């Protein structure tokens, strides 16, 4: 006797064993998060925040609290990306201000943010752990947000012209075009940069969770503060336990979150010929075998689709404006910006000149040149190494997913864990610190190039690859005429963020300490670090201003012209 269709549908909606497993996992996660979150509302003095135990039994709890902070910062970074980068991309005049500000923010060291934000957040919640938690989350946010914003901006400025024309033909509003075209087009690169942002948060975690600003000092339980305590105690075994914990945590969220996201983002490739997609990650396959969870996600998807389909008009849409008026308005706008910049420079110099002399400015500029030489050499080396490898990995769907966890772990590895090795070798063999401390600068930032190149190669249209294959384009001609132009916008995004990250990393790379031995290289990072340790605020401010000037100048002379070229000439 045939089973009625309605009965079959109702059976398919009933929960199955996979739903039960998902429910147990979600419940366990919520209980663990709730247990860890309750510590954020207790008084700061009685929370044990000043005491970090090196007992490895505490590492799971420390890891949970660290991951909670990092995902909270990642959520804030996504909100920042969808607002700030979109505004910069859709408004030319806003972009003249927002993008240079973004250049400065990504190059400023984390210590510069902590100096001001710790006092602010602790003042919001006096004597409470939540104030310190917000300060740490904001510090992690500053290591995550900038490359995500650059990725979104690059994608919004390189949307294929034929797709934009199609949205106009269908008369989509600005809101609809943003969610139906621009966000899906940006998604592959954004997800890879989210992965890099998580690694960037790990890289600077020791500075974020173990904070000392003036008379204010606190250690929040976490992997970063554990590593800082292990380094202070010169406990190599504890450092090894921390590294092992980092590896398992990164492997866990890579398998549970990022690998499914990378596989999901493959459907947003711009192509007319089906390309290799690789096997579904095991987590995504399990989720697709659930019933209740899939039904719930389908309803949420339909609700999201309805909201994003509203005919709203976004500000900043392009209007037909006479060329003469545009030039005049831009000239007035740039003139006003230059006046504001001149006033800001004058105020900073007025503050610094009370205790500093022109000789201090000359010293800071000279150290800036030293650091600039290091950054340029390291960027050239990282480009030559990671662009070919990133292309080969990105063109293979299975490899691009499998390499994710390993690349995230290497990118997350804190540079100060290499200090014992470098300091010991430099002291033992009387090596030059100006040369042998230099590799520490690029250890965490070179991965911005690799991740963005992988994203670009993964999003490269399969039909263009097929055309090149049919015409038998190979060898160096294939690299020069096919793949390098295709990934160039992604490479520029990675290079900009890697370059800014290199300047930021000089503060922990040009001064290496192991026990009572400290090795210093000549550079702007060491200049700012020593001034900060001495409490010399004018010199810290001078060093940061000089660093910002170097970063802005280099970006304007090198990276911005490349960005403009890729937006105009290398759009699909």
Image: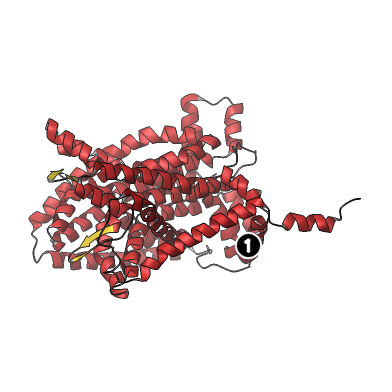
Instruction: Please identify the quarter of the rendering in which residue 326 is found.
Output: bottom left
Whether residue 18 is visible to the viewer of this picture, yes or no, is yes
Q: Secondary structure at mark 1?
A: helix
Residue 269 drawn at (x, y percent)? 58, 45
Instruction: Please identify the quarter of the rendering in which residue 40 is found.
Output: bottom left
Report the residue at 11% width, 32% height from top. Answer: 430
Residue 447 drawn at (x, y percent)? 38, 42
Give the side of residue 435 with respect to residue 278, left or right. Answer: left
The colour scheme is: secondary structure
Residue 373 drawn at (x, y percent)? 22, 41
For mark 1, does the 10 Å Cα neighbourhood hold few (<14), some (14 to 19), or many (20 or more) residues?
few
Q: Is residue 157 above or below residue 48?
A: above
Q: Is residue 513 above or below residue 112?
A: above
Q: Which residue is mark 1?
A: 300
Instruction: Please identify the quarter of the rendering in which residue 338 is found.
Output: bottom left
Whether residue 495 is visible to the viewer of this picture, yes or no, is no
Report the residue at 53% width, 51% height from top. Answer: 187
Q: Is residue 167 above or below residue 337?
A: above
User: How many marks do you count on the picture?
Assistant: 1
Most foreground residue, 455 or 409 = 409
Most foreground residue, 13 or 480 = 13
């Amino acid at each position: 006797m045939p089973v009625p269709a309605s009965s079959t549908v109702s059976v398919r909606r009933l929960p199955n064993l996979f739903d039960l497993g998902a429910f147990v996992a979600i419940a366990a996660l919520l209980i663990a998060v709730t247990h860890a979150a309750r510590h954020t509302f207790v008084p700061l003095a009685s929370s044990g925040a000043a005491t970090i135990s090196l007992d490895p039994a505490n590492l799971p709890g420390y890891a949970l609290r660290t991951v909670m902070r990092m995902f909270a910062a990642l959520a804030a970074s996504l909100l920042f990306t969808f607002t700030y980068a979109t505004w910069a991309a859709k408004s030319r005049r806003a972009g003249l201000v927002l993008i240079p500000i973004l250049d400065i923010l990504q190059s400023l060291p984390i210590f510069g943010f902590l100096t001001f934000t710790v006092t602010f957040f602790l003042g919001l919640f006096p004597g409470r752990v939540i104030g310190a938690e917000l300060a740490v989350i904001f510090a992690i946010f500053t290591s995550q947000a900038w490359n995500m914003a650059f990725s979104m901006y690059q994608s919004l400025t390189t949307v294929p012209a034929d797709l934009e024309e199609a949205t106009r033909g269908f008369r989509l509003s600005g809101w609809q075009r943003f969610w139906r075209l621009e966000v899906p087009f940006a998604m592959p690169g954004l997800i890879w940069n989210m992965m890099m942002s998580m690694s960037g948060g790990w890289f600077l975690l020791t500075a974020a969770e173990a904070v000392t600003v003036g008379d204010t000092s606190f250690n929040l339980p976490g992997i970063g503060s554990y590593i800082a305590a292990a380094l202070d105690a010169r406990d190599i075994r504890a450092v090894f336990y921390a590294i092992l914990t980092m590896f398992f945590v990164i492997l866990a969220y890579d398998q549970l979150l990022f690998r499914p996201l990378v596989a999901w983002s493959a459907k947003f490739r711009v192509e007319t010929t089906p390309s290799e997609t690789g096997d579904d990650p095991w987590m995504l396959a399990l989720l697709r075998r659930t019933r209740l969870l899939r039904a719930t996600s389908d309803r949420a998807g339909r609700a999201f689709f309805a909201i994003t389909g509203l005919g709203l008009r976004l500000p900043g849409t392009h209007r037909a404006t006479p060329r003469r008026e545009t030039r005049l308005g831009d000239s007035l706008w740039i003139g006003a910006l230059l006046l504001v910049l001149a006033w800001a420079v004058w105020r900073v110099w007025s503050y610094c000149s009370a205790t500093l002399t022109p000789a201090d400015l000359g010293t800071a500029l000279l150290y800036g040149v030293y650091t600039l030489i290091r950054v340029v050499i390291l960027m050239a080396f990282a480009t030559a190494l990671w662009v070919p490898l990133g292309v080969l990995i990105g063109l293979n769907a299975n490899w691009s997913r499998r390499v994710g966890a390993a690349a995230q772990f290497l990118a997350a590895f804190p540079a100060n864990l290499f200090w014992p090795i470098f300091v010991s070798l430099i002291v033992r063999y009387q090596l030059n610190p100006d040369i042998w401390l230099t590799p520490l600068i690029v250890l965490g930032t070179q991965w911005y190039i690799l991740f963005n190149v992988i994203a670009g190669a993964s999003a490269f249209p399969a039909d263009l690859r097929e055309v090149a294959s049919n015409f038998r384009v190979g060898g160096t001609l294939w690299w020069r005429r096919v793949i390098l132009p295709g990934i160039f916008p992604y490479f520029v995004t990675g290079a900009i963020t890697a370059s800014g990250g290199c300047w930021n990393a000089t503060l922990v790379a040009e001064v290496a300490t192991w026990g009572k031995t400290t090795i210093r290289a000549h550079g702007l990072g060491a200049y700012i670090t020593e001034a900060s340790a001495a409490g010399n605020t004018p010199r810290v401010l001078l060093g940061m201003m000089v660093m910002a000037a170097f970063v802005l100048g280099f970006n304007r002379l090198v990276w911005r012209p490349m960005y403009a070229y890729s937006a105009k000439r290398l759009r699909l």
